[in-house]
Amino acid sequence: MAKRPPTIPDSELDVLNVLWDRGQATVREVLEMLRAVGRQWSYATVATLLDRLETKGVVASDRSALAFVYRPVITSQEVRQKRINNLVEKLYHGEPGQLVLHLLKSHPLDPRQAMEVRAVLEEMTGERSRKGSEAPSPAAD
Amino acid sequence: MAKRPPTIPDSELDVLNVLWDRGQATVREVLEMLRAVGRQWSYATVATLLDRLETKGVVASDRSALAFVYRPVITSQEVRQKRINNLVEKLYHGEPGQLVLHLLKSHPLDPRQAMEVRAVLEEMTGERSRKGSEAPSPAAD
DNA sequence: GATATCCTAAGACAAATGTCGCACGATGTC
DNA sequence: GACATCGTGCGACATTTGTCTTAGGATATC
Protein backbone atom coordinates (compact mmCIF):
# COMPACT_ATOMS: atom_id res chain seq x y z
CA MET A 1 0.00 0.00 0.00
CA ALA A 2 2.95 2.27 -0.39
CA LYS A 3 1.94 5.66 -1.66
CA ARG A 4 3.25 6.43 -5.08
CA PRO A 5 6.74 7.83 -5.01
CA PRO A 6 6.69 11.60 -5.27
CA THR A 7 7.13 13.03 -8.72
CA ILE A 8 7.51 16.61 -9.83
CA PRO A 9 4.79 17.65 -12.23
CA ASP A 10 5.30 20.38 -14.77
CA SER A 11 3.65 23.12 -12.80
CA GLU A 12 5.89 22.49 -9.84
CA LEU A 13 8.83 22.33 -12.16
CA ASP A 14 8.12 25.84 -13.32
CA VAL A 15 8.34 27.01 -9.75
CA LEU A 16 11.43 25.00 -9.07
CA ASN A 17 13.10 26.51 -12.06
CA VAL A 18 12.75 29.96 -10.59
CA LEU A 19 14.34 28.78 -7.38
CA TRP A 20 17.23 27.23 -9.22
CA ASP A 21 17.67 30.41 -11.18
CA ARG A 22 17.85 32.77 -8.26
CA GLY A 23 18.87 30.48 -5.47
CA GLN A 24 15.93 31.35 -3.29
CA ALA A 25 12.76 33.35 -3.38
CA THR A 26 9.52 34.19 -1.65
CA VAL A 27 6.14 33.28 -2.99
CA ARG A 28 5.74 36.75 -4.38
CA GLU A 29 9.07 36.75 -6.09
CA VAL A 30 8.38 33.46 -7.74
CA LEU A 31 5.02 34.81 -8.79
CA GLU A 32 6.60 37.87 -10.37
CA MET A 33 9.19 35.83 -12.16
CA LEU A 34 6.59 33.53 -13.60
CA ARG A 35 4.34 36.40 -14.57
CA ALA A 36 7.25 37.82 -16.51
CA VAL A 37 7.37 34.62 -18.46
CA GLY A 38 3.70 34.43 -19.23
CA ARG A 39 2.36 32.25 -16.47
CA GLN A 40 -0.81 33.89 -15.21
CA TRP A 41 -1.11 32.23 -11.88
CA SER A 42 -2.65 33.62 -8.73
CA TYR A 43 -0.58 34.19 -5.65
CA ALA A 44 -2.30 31.29 -3.95
CA THR A 45 -1.44 28.91 -6.72
CA VAL A 46 2.24 29.61 -6.42
CA ALA A 47 2.00 29.27 -2.66
CA THR A 48 0.33 25.90 -3.02
CA LEU A 49 2.94 24.70 -5.43
CA LEU A 50 5.77 25.74 -3.15
CA ASP A 51 4.03 24.05 -0.30
CA ARG A 52 3.69 20.84 -2.18
CA LEU A 53 7.29 20.97 -3.21
CA GLU A 54 8.27 21.36 0.40
CA THR A 55 6.07 18.44 1.40
CA LYS A 56 7.82 16.36 -1.20
CA GLY A 57 11.08 17.41 0.30
CA VAL A 58 12.53 19.07 -2.74
CA VAL A 59 12.55 22.59 -1.36
CA ALA A 60 13.04 23.98 2.13
CA SER A 61 11.91 27.24 3.63
CA ASP A 62 13.36 29.80 5.97
CA ARG A 63 10.37 30.82 8.04
CA SER A 64 12.07 33.39 10.24
CA ALA A 65 11.04 36.38 8.22
CA LEU A 66 7.57 37.60 7.53
CA ALA A 67 7.43 36.06 4.11
CA PHE A 68 8.93 32.59 3.95
CA VAL A 69 11.96 32.26 1.77
CA TYR A 70 12.06 29.05 -0.22
CA ARG A 71 15.16 27.37 -1.44
CA PRO A 72 15.70 24.22 -3.50
CA VAL A 73 17.02 21.18 -1.73
CA ILE A 74 17.69 19.14 -4.81
CA THR A 75 19.72 20.24 -7.77
CA SER A 76 18.42 20.56 -11.27
CA GLN A 77 20.95 17.86 -12.05
CA GLU A 78 19.11 15.32 -10.01
CA VAL A 79 15.82 16.06 -11.63
CA ARG A 80 17.36 16.13 -15.03
CA GLN A 81 18.96 12.77 -14.51
CA LYS A 82 15.68 11.20 -13.50
CA ARG A 83 13.92 12.59 -16.51
CA ILE A 84 16.65 11.44 -18.80
CA ASN A 85 16.56 7.96 -17.37
CA ASN A 86 12.84 7.83 -17.75
CA LEU A 87 13.01 9.02 -21.33
CA VAL A 88 15.68 6.54 -22.30
CA GLU A 89 13.93 3.65 -20.64
CA LYS A 90 10.33 4.32 -21.53
CA LEU A 91 10.79 5.63 -25.03
CA TYR A 92 14.10 4.33 -26.29
CA HIS A 93 14.25 0.80 -24.92
CA GLY A 94 17.23 1.83 -22.87
CA GLU A 95 19.08 2.69 -26.07
CA PRO A 96 20.46 6.23 -25.80
CA GLY A 97 21.82 6.27 -29.33
CA GLN A 98 18.60 7.04 -31.11
CA LEU A 99 17.76 9.63 -28.54
CA VAL A 100 20.97 11.50 -29.16
CA LEU A 101 20.39 11.36 -32.87
CA HIS A 102 16.86 12.65 -32.58
CA LEU A 103 18.02 15.33 -30.27
CA LEU A 104 20.67 16.58 -32.62
CA LYS A 105 18.25 16.53 -35.49
CA SER A 106 15.50 18.46 -33.77
CA HIS A 107 17.64 20.74 -31.63
CA PRO A 108 20.83 21.61 -33.49
CA LEU A 109 23.74 22.55 -31.27
CA ASP A 110 25.58 25.79 -31.58
CA PRO A 111 29.21 25.40 -32.71
CA ARG A 112 30.76 25.65 -29.29
CA GLN A 113 28.66 22.91 -27.81
CA ALA A 114 28.88 20.80 -30.90
CA MET A 115 32.65 20.80 -30.53
CA GLU A 116 32.41 20.00 -26.89
CA VAL A 117 30.18 17.05 -27.50
CA ARG A 118 32.36 15.99 -30.33
CA ALA A 119 35.38 15.95 -28.08
CA VAL A 120 33.63 13.70 -25.62
CA LEU A 121 32.63 11.37 -28.39
CA GLU A 122 36.06 11.18 -29.86
CA GLU A 123 37.40 10.19 -26.53
CA MET A 124 34.71 7.60 -26.37
CA THR A 125 35.22 6.10 -29.79
CA GLY A 126 38.96 6.15 -29.67
CA GLU A 127 40.82 9.34 -30.40
CA ARG A 128 40.84 8.83 -34.13
CA SER A 129 40.81 12.44 -35.33
CA ARG A 130 44.14 14.16 -34.92
CA LYS A 131 43.94 17.87 -34.77
CA GLY A 132 46.34 18.95 -32.08
CA SER A 133 44.34 21.59 -30.27
CA GLU A 134 42.60 19.51 -27.69
CA ALA A 135 42.55 22.23 -25.10
CA PRO A 136 39.91 21.21 -22.62
CA SER A 137 37.27 23.84 -22.98
CA PRO A 138 36.35 25.01 -19.49
CA ALA A 139 32.72 25.66 -20.11
CA ALA A 140 31.12 27.53 -17.30
CA ASP A 141 27.54 26.73 -16.54
CA MET B 1 -12.61 26.39 -19.63
CA ALA B 2 -10.58 24.34 -22.04
CA LYS B 3 -9.80 20.95 -20.64
CA ARG B 4 -6.14 20.30 -20.27
CA PRO B 5 -4.62 19.05 -23.47
CA PRO B 6 -4.34 15.26 -23.46
CA THR B 7 -1.04 13.89 -22.31
CA ILE B 8 0.20 10.34 -22.14
CA PRO B 9 1.03 9.30 -18.61
CA ASP B 10 3.58 6.64 -17.89
CA SER B 11 1.11 3.84 -17.36
CA GLU B 12 -0.46 4.44 -20.72
CA LEU B 13 2.97 4.68 -22.24
CA ASP B 14 3.73 1.17 -21.09
CA VAL B 15 0.70 -0.06 -22.95
CA LEU B 16 1.51 1.99 -26.00
CA ASN B 17 4.98 0.53 -26.08
CA VAL B 18 3.56 -2.93 -26.48
CA LEU B 19 1.46 -1.79 -29.38
CA TRP B 20 4.41 -0.16 -31.05
CA ASP B 21 6.40 -3.30 -30.54
CA ARG B 22 3.97 -5.69 -32.10
CA GLY B 23 1.93 -3.42 -34.29
CA GLN B 24 -1.35 -4.38 -32.71
CA ALA B 25 -2.72 -6.42 -29.88
CA THR B 26 -5.76 -7.34 -27.83
CA VAL B 27 -6.16 -6.47 -24.21
CA ARG B 28 -5.05 -9.91 -23.21
CA GLU B 29 -1.98 -9.84 -25.38
CA VAL B 30 -0.92 -6.54 -23.96
CA LEU B 31 -1.52 -7.91 -20.52
CA GLU B 32 0.67 -10.93 -21.19
CA MET B 33 3.43 -8.82 -22.63
CA LEU B 34 3.43 -6.54 -19.64
CA ARG B 35 3.31 -9.42 -17.21
CA ALA B 36 6.40 -10.76 -18.88
CA VAL B 37 8.12 -7.52 -18.07
CA GLY B 38 7.09 -7.40 -14.47
CA ARG B 39 3.98 -5.26 -14.56
CA GLN B 40 1.42 -6.99 -12.35
CA TRP B 41 -1.71 -5.37 -13.64
CA SER B 42 -5.16 -6.83 -13.78
CA TYR B 43 -6.94 -7.41 -17.04
CA ALA B 44 -9.29 -4.57 -16.24
CA THR B 45 -6.49 -2.15 -15.74
CA VAL B 46 -5.03 -2.79 -19.14
CA ALA B 47 -8.47 -2.52 -20.67
CA THR B 48 -8.99 0.82 -19.01
CA LEU B 49 -5.69 2.14 -20.22
CA LEU B 50 -6.36 1.07 -23.77
CA ASP B 51 -9.74 2.66 -23.55
CA ARG B 52 -8.30 5.92 -22.34
CA LEU B 53 -5.71 5.85 -25.06
CA GLU B 54 -8.42 5.43 -27.60
CA THR B 55 -10.39 8.29 -26.12
CA LYS B 56 -7.33 10.44 -26.44
CA GLY B 57 -7.11 9.40 -30.03
CA VAL B 58 -3.69 7.83 -29.89
CA VAL B 59 -4.83 4.29 -30.58
CA ALA B 60 -7.66 2.84 -32.65
CA SER B 61 -9.44 -0.46 -32.38
CA ASP B 62 -10.78 -3.02 -34.77
CA ARG B 63 -13.98 -4.13 -33.13
CA SER B 64 -15.07 -6.67 -35.66
CA ALA B 65 -13.70 -9.66 -33.83
CA LEU B 66 -14.67 -10.94 -30.46
CA ALA B 67 -11.79 -9.33 -28.71
CA PHE B 68 -10.99 -5.85 -29.93
CA VAL B 69 -7.66 -5.43 -31.59
CA TYR B 70 -5.93 -2.19 -30.72
CA ARG B 71 -3.42 -0.45 -32.89
CA PRO B 72 -1.42 2.73 -32.36
CA VAL B 73 -2.42 5.77 -34.35
CA ILE B 74 0.59 7.86 -33.49
CA THR B 75 4.17 6.85 -33.89
CA SER B 76 6.64 6.56 -31.10
CA GLN B 77 8.50 9.28 -32.95
CA GLU B 78 5.79 11.79 -32.27
CA VAL B 79 5.67 11.02 -28.60
CA ARG B 80 9.42 11.00 -28.37
CA GLN B 81 9.67 14.38 -29.99
CA LYS B 82 7.21 15.90 -27.58
CA ARG B 83 9.06 14.50 -24.62
CA ILE B 84 12.35 15.71 -25.93
CA ASN B 85 11.00 19.19 -26.50
CA ASN B 86 9.58 19.26 -23.04
CA LEU B 87 12.81 18.10 -21.51
CA VAL B 88 14.90 20.63 -23.38
CA GLU B 89 12.58 23.48 -22.60
CA LYS B 90 11.67 22.78 -19.02
CA LEU B 91 14.99 21.50 -17.77
CA TYR B 92 17.64 22.85 -20.09
CA HIS B 93 16.48 26.35 -20.84
CA GLY B 94 16.09 25.36 -24.44
CA GLU B 95 19.80 24.54 -24.58
CA PRO B 96 20.26 21.01 -25.94
CA GLY B 97 24.01 21.00 -25.46
CA GLN B 98 24.04 20.22 -21.79
CA LEU B 99 21.42 17.59 -22.28
CA VAL B 100 23.52 15.77 -24.83
CA LEU B 101 26.51 15.93 -22.55
CA HIS B 102 24.58 14.60 -19.61
CA LEU B 103 23.13 11.91 -21.74
CA LEU B 104 26.49 10.71 -22.95
CA LYS B 105 27.86 10.76 -19.46
CA SER B 106 25.08 8.78 -17.88
CA HIS B 107 24.23 6.51 -20.79
CA PRO B 108 27.39 5.67 -22.71
CA LEU B 109 26.82 4.77 -26.32
CA ASP B 110 28.00 1.55 -27.80
CA PRO B 111 30.72 1.98 -30.44
CA ARG B 112 28.48 1.74 -33.44
CA GLN B 113 26.15 4.43 -32.30
CA ALA B 114 28.94 6.56 -30.98
CA MET B 115 30.45 6.62 -34.43
CA GLU B 116 27.14 7.39 -35.99
CA VAL B 117 26.56 10.32 -33.72
CA ARG B 118 30.08 11.42 -34.24
CA ALA B 119 29.56 11.50 -37.97
CA VAL B 120 26.54 13.70 -37.60
CA LEU B 121 28.46 16.03 -35.38
CA GLU B 122 31.40 16.28 -37.68
CA GLU B 123 29.10 17.28 -40.43
CA MET B 124 27.65 19.82 -38.10
CA THR B 125 30.91 21.36 -36.94
CA GLY B 126 32.56 21.29 -40.29
CA GLU B 127 34.29 18.11 -41.38
CA ARG B 128 37.52 18.93 -39.60
CA SER B 129 38.75 15.44 -38.79
CA ARG B 130 40.14 13.73 -41.86
CA LYS B 131 40.51 10.04 -41.70
CA GLY B 132 39.46 8.63 -45.04
CA SER B 133 37.26 5.72 -44.08
CA GLU B 134 34.15 7.63 -43.24
CA ALA B 135 31.70 5.47 -45.10
CA PRO B 136 28.35 7.03 -44.32
CA SER B 137 26.51 4.47 -42.31
CA PRO B 138 22.91 4.41 -43.45
CA ALA B 139 21.45 3.04 -40.30
CA ALA B 140 18.00 1.71 -40.71
CA ASP B 141 15.59 2.18 -37.85
C1' DG C 1 -4.89 52.54 17.24
C1' DA C 2 -7.85 52.23 12.97
C1' DT C 3 -6.66 50.93 8.28
C1' DA C 4 -4.90 49.09 4.48
C1' DT C 5 -1.54 45.38 3.29
C1' DC C 6 0.77 41.23 2.87
C1' DC C 7 1.30 36.56 4.61
C1' DT C 8 0.29 31.89 5.64
C1' DA C 9 -3.13 28.25 6.82
C1' DA C 10 -6.70 25.53 5.44
C1' DG C 11 -9.74 23.96 2.38
C1' DA C 12 -12.28 23.53 -1.88
C1' DC C 13 -13.00 21.45 -6.26
C1' DA C 14 -12.65 19.65 -10.94
C1' DA C 15 -9.84 16.82 -13.91
C1' DA C 16 -6.32 13.30 -14.60
C1' DT C 17 -3.99 9.02 -13.10
C1' DG C 18 -3.47 4.50 -11.14
C1' DT C 19 -5.95 0.30 -10.32
C1' DC C 20 -9.60 -2.38 -9.92
C1' DG C 21 -14.58 -5.15 -9.51
C1' DC C 22 -18.53 -6.86 -11.43
C1' DA C 23 -22.65 -7.49 -14.29
C1' DC C 24 -23.81 -9.40 -18.49
C1' DG C 25 -23.48 -10.89 -23.30
C1' DA C 26 -20.84 -13.89 -26.79
C1' DT C 27 -18.40 -18.38 -27.42
C1' DG C 28 -16.77 -22.93 -26.97
C1' DT C 29 -17.55 -27.60 -25.22
C1' DC C 30 -19.92 -31.90 -24.17
C1' DG D 1 -28.71 -26.59 -24.05
C1' DA D 2 -26.00 -26.11 -19.57
C1' DC D 3 -21.63 -24.56 -18.02
C1' DA D 4 -17.25 -22.65 -17.95
C1' DT D 5 -14.73 -18.89 -20.43
C1' DC D 6 -13.45 -14.71 -22.18
C1' DG D 7 -14.56 -10.02 -23.46
C1' DT D 8 -16.53 -5.41 -23.10
C1' DG D 9 -19.13 -1.79 -20.60
C1' DC D 10 -19.52 0.90 -16.75
C1' DG D 11 -18.48 2.40 -12.62
C1' DA D 12 -15.81 2.93 -8.47
C1' DC D 13 -12.30 4.92 -5.56
C1' DA D 14 -8.01 6.83 -3.72
C1' DT D 15 -4.27 10.04 -5.17
C1' DT D 16 -2.27 13.65 -7.67
C1' DT D 17 -2.32 17.78 -10.28
C1' DG D 18 -4.05 22.34 -11.51
C1' DT D 19 -6.03 26.51 -9.62
C1' DC D 20 -8.36 29.20 -6.39
C1' DT D 21 -11.05 31.36 -2.27
C1' DT D 22 -11.34 32.83 2.15
C1' DA D 23 -10.32 33.51 7.08
C1' DG D 24 -7.39 35.50 10.20
C1' DG D 25 -2.83 36.90 11.91
C1' DA D 26 1.37 40.11 11.42
C1' DT D 27 2.99 44.74 9.67
C1' DA D 28 3.14 49.08 8.06
C1' DT D 29 0.87 53.84 7.87
C1' DC D 30 -1.06 57.92 9.55
Image (spheres, coloured by chain):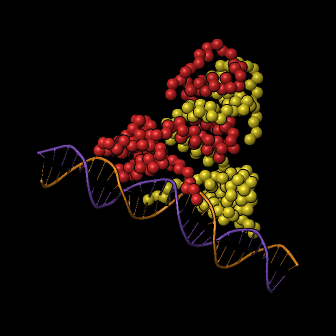
Chain colours: A yellow, B red, C purple, D orange
Evaluate whether residue B39 shows in this view: yes
A76 or B18: nearer the eye?
A: B18
Q: Quadrant of residue A129?
A: top right
Q: Nearer the viewer, residue B45 or A134?
A: B45
Is residue A116 visible to us here? no
Q: Residue at x 49, y 39 (%)?
A: B74
Q: Quadrant of the N terminus of chain B?
A: bottom right
The correct choice, above or below, for B54 with respect to A24 in the image is above
The quadrant in which residue A139 appears is: top right
**Count of labels in the image:** 0
Q: Position of residue B131 (x, y in %)?
A: 66, 15
Residue A108 coordinates in the image, percent (x, y) = 67, 32
Asked if residue B59 is positioned above or below residue B122 in the image, the reply reads: below
Q: Residue at x 68, y 16 (%)?
A: B130
> Where is residue A7 shown, x and y percent of the image?
56, 53
- Looking at the image, residue A122 lies above or below residue A46: above
Q: Residue at x 53, y 50 (%)?
A: B6
Across and down, in percent, residue A48 comes to 63, 63
The structure residue drawn at horizontal position 63% and vertical position 60%, both measured from the top left corner, is A49
**Is residue A137 left or right of B50 when viewed as pictured?**
right
